[in-house]
Amino acid sequence: MVSAKIDNMILKGIGVSAGIAIGQAKIADRARVAVVETTVKEHEIPFELDRLKTALEMARIELEGVKETISANGGDEHIHHIDTHLLLLQDAMLVEETSALIEKEGINAEGALKRTLHRLKSLFSGIEDEYLRERGADVETVVERILRNMVGQRHEPLTGLEGKVIVVAHDLSPSDILQMDKTKAIGFITEMGGKTSHTSILARAMEIPAVVGMERITGMVDGDVTIIIDGSTGTVILNPDQDTFRDYLRRKQHYEYVERELLKLKDLPAVTLDGFAMSLKANVEIVEEVPSVRRHGAEGIGLYRTEMLFFNRNNLPDEEEQFAAYAEIIRKMAPNPVTIRTLDVGGDKVLNDLNLGDEANPALGVRAIRLSLMQPQAFRTQLRAILRASAHGKTRVFFPMISGIDEVRRAKAIVEEVKQELRSEFIPFDEDILVGIMIEIPSAVIIADLLAREVDFFSVGTNDLIQYSLAIDRTNEHLSSLYEPLHPAVLRSLKMVVDAAHGAGIEACICGEMAGDPEYLPILLGLGFDELSMNAVSIPRVKNILRRCTRKEAEAVAARAMTYATAQEAESYLKSVIAARFSDSFD
Ligand code: PEP
Ligand code: MG
C-alpha cells in the first residue's frame, strides 16, 4: 500500500475521458473473488448445481434492482447496459458449460464457473480488435457478480459516498458508473479496460474524468491517499506534493475555464474570418452521447458507428430494435442530420450470427461492406431500419471500407431494392436520403474521381486510411511513432479525395481522429474539406481555431505543408504556424 509518506508517485494509464479530478481514493471492492477449485463427491453434484442456480438467480434479482435504481434516477436510456448483463446470465455457454463441468468433472460450482470464465476470456483475448476484445470485460463483470453470490460476498453498490472521491477499482461495470453520484464520485481509475469499453464510453458521455488500464492500482492505494487524475493524458499522481498539487489545481482551473469559455462558442457559427462555413459534427456510438454532443454545439452527427448495437449478444438485433435505436438518435438530434454508417465488423470482429470462420489476415479479410455484401439479409435488415428511421429526421447513410466501384454499385442496388420494398408496403422513408462512402483504403483514394460519380458524399476515415497507406497496424503500440497523419502520402491522399469530390460536386468530410485535433485544422480547412466530424468535446477547440483563421491563409498553410518530404518537417512547420498565429488560444 502507498502510505501518506510516499509522496508524488506518478503513474501512467490510458486516459479515456478528459478532465482533471483531485480527491481522496475510494477503493471499490471489485477485486476478484478468491476461488478455490475442489472436487466434489457424486452425491454432492446436485447441491453444487443448485448453488450455481441460486447464485445466478441472486445476480438476476440484483441486476433487476439496479435497473429500478437507474430508472428511479431518470436514467432509462442507460438501462440497456444492464440488459446486456441480464442476457449474459442466460448465456448458454456460460450456464450450460459450467453445469456440464460440475456434472462431468465433479468440481465445485465456483471452480467450474471460473474455468468457464477462463475459456471465455481466452476466446475474447484472442480477438485482435480492441473494441470487441473489451466485450470480454462484460462477461468477467457478470461472472464476478455470480461468484460473489456463491461465496456470500455482496456486490456493494457505489452509492452513499462521502465527500469528493476518486473511485479506484479492479474494474467497474457500466451499472457502477450509472449508479454513481457524480457530485461525489468525481473521477475513476480502473485496472481493466481500454478506450472503447462500455465503461469508458459512458465516462465520456457523462464527462467524468477517467483513467483505465492501470494495472495493480488497487494494491497500491488505500482510503488515505489523495489522488490526482488527468483523464486527457492518462496521468495519475498518488499523494501529490505541494508543488504538484498546486500545479494540477491550476491546470484543473484552467481546463474548466477553457471549457466554460469554449462552450460560449457553442452557438456561434463555425465560420472562418473570411466567411467560409465548415460543418463541425460529432462521432457517436451510443445514444447516451447525445446530450454531450448538443452541449458542445455539434451541427449534427457525422459518424454514428452502429457496431455497439451488434456486440454483446448471441443474435443479431432485428429490424425493430435497430429502427428504435436509429430513430431515437435521429429524433434527439433533430433538426440536425445524423449520418449512419452500416455495420463495420467482420474479420477480427466476429459476430456469432455473421461468422465466416478464421482468417489468416483479418485486417485484409471479410469485413465491413464486404461482409454486408456476402450476408445481404443482415445488410437489408439494417438498411430497412435506417430507411424507416429516416422518416423521423434528416438522415444520411454511408458504407465503410469501400475499395472499388463494384461494391458501391452493389450496395446502392440493395438500397434501391429496399426502398422499393418499403414503397410497396407504404412504409414512409426519406426518398432523398443521401448515400455516401468512407474513403479509408488507398485504392479508393486513387479512384476517388470515379467513386465520386456514384455517391452523394465522401467521408474520409483517416484512422484506417493511415493504417492501410503506411501499412501500420493502428493498434500496435510499437509502431505508434510511424503512424503519421502528416506523412506526405497521407496529405496527398487527402488532397486527391477533396479534389475528386469537388470535381463531381459532392461534399468531402473527414470522420477519423485527425478531424478532432485543432492543430490539423488549418491543413484540413486549407485542403478544402467541407465537414469535420469528431469526439464532441473537441468541437469547441476546433471551432475556436476555425473562427480565427481565414480560408486563404489556411490554403497557404496546406500548400506549404505539402511541400515537405517528411512528416516531421511538416509537423514542425505546423507547430510554428500554431505558435505564431494561435499561441494565445486555448489549449
Ligand atoms: C476511420 O477509420 O477513420 C474511422 C472513422 O472508422 P473506425 O475508426 O470506426 O474504423
Ligand atoms: Mg475505419
Image: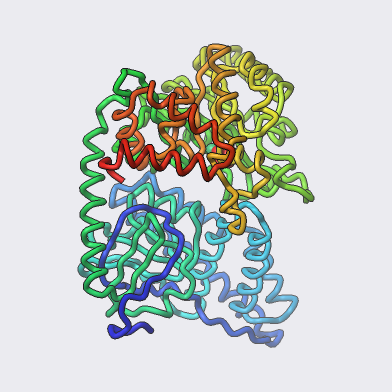
Residue 443 in the image: above or below residue 239: above
Whether residue 351 can be seen here = no
- Residue 106 image position (x, y, % from top left): 71, 81
Of the 4 image quadrants, the one containing the N terminus is bottom left
- Residue at image position (58%, 58%) is 477
Most foreground residue, 118 or 454: 454
**Which quadrant of the figure has residue 21?**
bottom left
Left or right for 168, reference 342: left
Whether residue 299 can be seen here = yes
**Which quadrant of the figure has residue 542?**
top left
Most foreground residue, 331 or 249: 249
Left or right for 110, reference 105: left
The image's colour scheme reads rainbow
Residue 558 in the image: above or below residue 500: below
- Residue 465 image position (x, y, % from top left): 61, 37
- Residue 486 image position (x, y, % from top left): 53, 39
- Residue at image position (39%, 65%) is 189
Left or right for 387, reference 420: left
Most foreground residue, 158 or 583: 583
- Residue 97 image position (x, y, % from top left): 69, 66
